[in-house]
Amino acid sequence: MMRLKAQDPRWRERLDRRRKRGLRDQARVLDGARTILEDVRKNGDRAVLRYTLKFDGVRLKAADLRVPADEIAGAAAGCDRAGLAALRLAARRIERFHRRQVRKGWSIGGRGERLGQRVTPIARVGLYVPGGRAAYPSTVLMTALPARIAGVAERVMCTPPGPDGEVSPWVLAAAGLAGVTEVYKVGGVQAIGALAYGTATIRPVDKVVGPGNAHVAAAKRWVFGEVGIDQIAGPSELLVVADDSARPDWVAADLLAQAEHDPDAWVGLVAVGSGARSRNLADRVVEALNGRLRNLERRRIAAAAWKRNGLVVEAAEMETAAGVAAAIRPEHLSLAVRDAGRWVGRFCCAGAVFVGGYSPVAVGDYVAGPNHDGRRRAVRLAPGRGRFCAAHRRRFDEPGRPGGCGRCGHDPREPGGAGRARRIDRGAAFPKGGGTGREAVTPGPPRAPGEEDTVDFDIVLSILFF
């Protein structure tokens, strides 16, 4: 863990040295990804099966790769009712949010001419859903639902098999709920290669979207041009800006909820306060984090991320903190400060902004409704996903006041997500109500290619993922 003081004129230099270390690591990952991709391009299913055995420890045949439709349809039977209700709640909120992003075509004309823009859906999109360390049904919803709303006809999901060679019933239940049309038991770089180049079993797609580890991010970088991609994502990131009005144990819980994603996850704190206040706050958060870490289910992963990539910066005032955030440009930014709403405009260099202490990032991971935006400074390049969008678009999650988290508390607790579930229980404040939790999300009417009320997948998909 690195600790800096913003008043030190060399803090940027020290931060850049750590970033350059990450770039050296990235070069090695890129070389490894290219080797696997070339093998998949040349050898198709044989290469996919070989790498599945090597990296996932599962021996499959080509005929085993595709998950049968009846298995997807029956997956919900292996999930508890409260968890399914939470999935349906999340699906409704995600769908409601993304329907507002749908854009129509337009035309102008006069004196015998007509010019315009027709926005149409991509035909076939690959959805990458991580696995291995945990199961992520929320990622299924956050990739598949925007694609379905956009009118994408073929929504193809790849996700790693578990040790038993099967896909988590939670992931399959979410796939059925979100209208995924094909599911394959393939993960990692080989999955990105199969989606981009195609194999005898998996037909190639037009665009690949979804989160993943550094290897998956490297693979997406290589296949761009062969197919479209949403962005270069990579491990999860969170920067919390907090003052002495924040609860140190809640800040610590937010940091651990992202650190437990991956040993390469990046988490940081900017402690704001004059004199010794910033140092005292930073000390209290670090103490709370270390205490929680001892009892965390995924403590080895979270501890590795905190040791390697943790950051604590002391800042005397909010303007200084805004400068630190602008230099880092994180995936998630949490403002746990007084009058957080009035500071949102100063913290625009982030993928998703969570406003106030009662807006835990874990709620955005699961059920708030907005999707996610870029990581590792990528937000400066693509602040909002939109091929025709020139304006910066941001997602602001501000659940409300203290007083319980209502149906959010019934989140399915994705396996391996205990830290996130705990932070939701302790801090979220969604108003109760909003349906019985039993209603299924049903697909909308099919749209004919070329209709002016359809929308290109680029526009509705505002992804940072996790």
Image (cartoon, grey):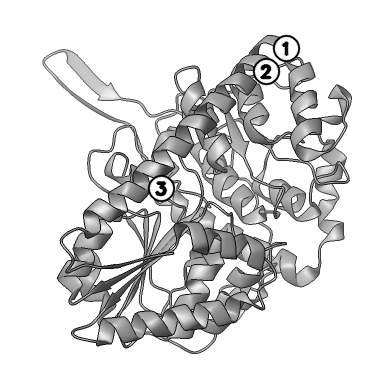
State which quadrant residue 212 falls in.
top right
Amino acid beneath label 3: Arg
Query: CB of mark 2 within 8 Å of CB of mark 1?
Result: yes
* Residue 3 in the image, given as x and y percentages of width and height: 35, 68
Of helix, strand and loop, which one carries label 3? loop
Q: Is residue 237 above or below residue 248?
A: above
Of helix, strand and loop, which one carries label 2? helix
In front of the other: 226 or 80: 226
Q: Is residue 89 left or right of residue 81?
A: left
Badge 3: residue crowd in 10 Å (few <14, some 14–19, many ≥20):
many
Q: CA distance from mark 3 to mark 1?
A: 32 Å
Q: Specify the label residue 43 is tagged with.
A: 1
Which residue is under mark 2?
40
Q: Is residue 384 visible?
A: no
Amino acid beneath label 2: Val
In front of the other: 379 or 207: 379
* Residue 197 in the image, given as x and y percentages of width and height: 61, 17
Which residue is under mark 3?
375
Of helix, strand and loop, which one carries label 1? helix
In front of the other: 154 or 411: 411
State which quadrant residue 102 falls in.
top left
